Amino acid sequence: MLNFAPYLSTMNIPQSSFPRIVIIGGGFGGISLAKKLSKKEVQVVLLDKHNYHNFQPLLYQVSTGGLEPDSIAYPIRKVLQNYPNFFFRLAEVNEVITKEKLIKTNIGDLKYDYLVLATGSETNFFGNSEIEKNSMAMKTIPQALNLRSLILENFEQALLTDDLHERDALMNFVIVGGGPTGVELAGALAEIKKGILPKDYPDLDTRRAQINIIQAGDCLLKGMSSKASKKAEDFLEKLGVQVWKNTRVTSYDGKLVTTKTDLTFESATLVWAAGVQAVSLKGLNAKEFLTYSNRLKVNEFNLVEGFDTIFAIGDVALMETEDCPYGHPMMAQPAIQQGKCLGDNLVRLLEEKPMKPFEYKDKGSMATIGRNKAVVDLPNFKFQGVFAWFVWMFVHLFFLIGFRNRMVVFINWVYNYIRFDREARLIIRPYRKNYSQFKD
Ligand SMILES: Cc1cc2nc3c(=O)[nH]c(=O)nc-3n(C[C@H](O)[C@H](O)[C@H](O)COP(=O)(O)OP(=O)(O)OC[C@H]3O[C@@H](n4cnc5c(N)ncnc54)[C@H](O)[C@@H]3O)c2cc1C
């Protein structure tokens, strides 16, 4: 066994004769790694700025009133509660001092023997601060709740104005980004327009509501097959969504969306789903460590280039391989698989055995556009429509953490399917948009 220097205990974490592995981030990668290290001869400290795991693929359903936020969140402490060698601390990590093997957080400093970064990604506004200030992102549960409130507040506000121009802008939704997030959100909004708004707002002409999805490239769902992309576009158009391709949004002042072409949109709501970038930490954010989208360059064992005790997994890691020269897709599967592989490798490392290189097994990708409408690309089989929709639901239920969450989501989906409804359309925490600009 390797020997480890004793260090002072901080954050009330007891000293241990076992090596200390600190994991930053309890997302898909961090949790799957932690599970692999259970009952091993290591002390594991998991740090996250939230006390819950967020199942991001269903965030759009929270934004559109289909699910309550607590059905897609799961307490991290519950995941770890049966492992005596585990410690969780609710902490935001600010810096890594690599020379001292120390991390600095908002609740104190902590030494590590091995460090794993699993900090995921954040919305990338590509340096456009005006869009960042005025648009809505959908990466966290609070952001999804803000969007839910804003959508509903817009309709309440639309009822109050006699100005048709202003009313149309309040009911005009612009989604930027034609990836799965944008497509799924556009489909859900179109279903709300069709099935819910006429009943909820009989005194408002909700037929005038518009849903626009804008994509800079020439197709939707770029990472999927051309068949899936085409079918998703057909589904959206049938639902009444306006699809704008080869259109790049350049600015949004909270009222007017401008693009590189002559196209403009007056809208109270712009949802930015056009890109993500890795969450980088001070101490590991120098140019020499970062690659595309701020991801840290790692080798085939997820070891960050230039270090022998710092690893990175999931969205924050970029591993160049022959199949994925720009790194694995920033999706849940690579994060889960890297977490599992690194768990085995850390045990091998401590037993002084050679580590095994990571091999990504592409299990396919999918997106849903609405009721009975989904597209699924499996490695050897691609299909769309009703069956794809059932497969999409089954896969999402399977990967949700927690029996209660699975049951709640399942019951909600059955109820919504039978009743054509989404009952979580509640303004619990109002989002304060400055509507006065529409009066100009
Ligand atoms: C709206 C949306 C829809 C998506 N849909 C899909 C989909 O359908 N299929 C799919 O495969 N993928 C989907 N993804 C992508 C998928 O969610 C990510 O690729 C995946 O979560 C990456 O896992 P991760 O472990 O790297 O990071 P995450 O799961 O994002 O976890 C990172 C964790 O780190 C914590 N953290 C970050 N910084 C700090 C810090 N400084 N200190 C402490 N804690 C910190 C965060 O709180 C978080 O808990 C979607 C993402 C979004 C936003």
Image (cartoon, rainbow, N blue to C red):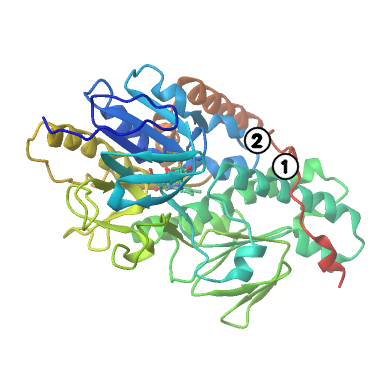
Report helix, strand or loop for mark 1.
loop
SS of the residue under disc 2: loop
**Hey, what amino acid is under mark 1?**
Ile
Residue topped by disc 1? 196
According to the picture, the residue beneath numbered tag 2 turns out to be 420
Tag 1 near tag 2, CB within 8 Å:
yes
**Number of numbered discs on residues:** 2
Please give the name of the residue rendered at 56% of the width and 45% of the height, measured from the top-left corner: 60
Picture disc at residue 114: none
Q: Position of residue 186 (x, y in %)?
A: 58, 54
Disc 1, ligand 1: is the CB inside 8 Å? Answer: no
Quadrant location, ligand no. 1: top left
Which residue is pictured at 42% across the width and 39% down the height? 392
Q: Nearer the viewer, residue 158 or 303?
A: 303
Residue sitting at the far left: 353
Q: Tell me the quadrant of the picture where the N terminus can be found.
A: top left
Residue 124, percent from left and from top: 49, 62
Picture coordinates of residue 253, whole percent (x, y): 70, 71
Rounded to the nearest angstrom, the CA distance separating label 1 from label 2 is 8 Å
Q: Which of these two is toward me, 274 or 106? A: 106
Residue furthest to the bottom in view is 262
Q: Identify which residue is drawn at 72% across, 46% down.
A: 149
Answer with mark 1 or mark 2, whichever residue precedes in sequence.
1
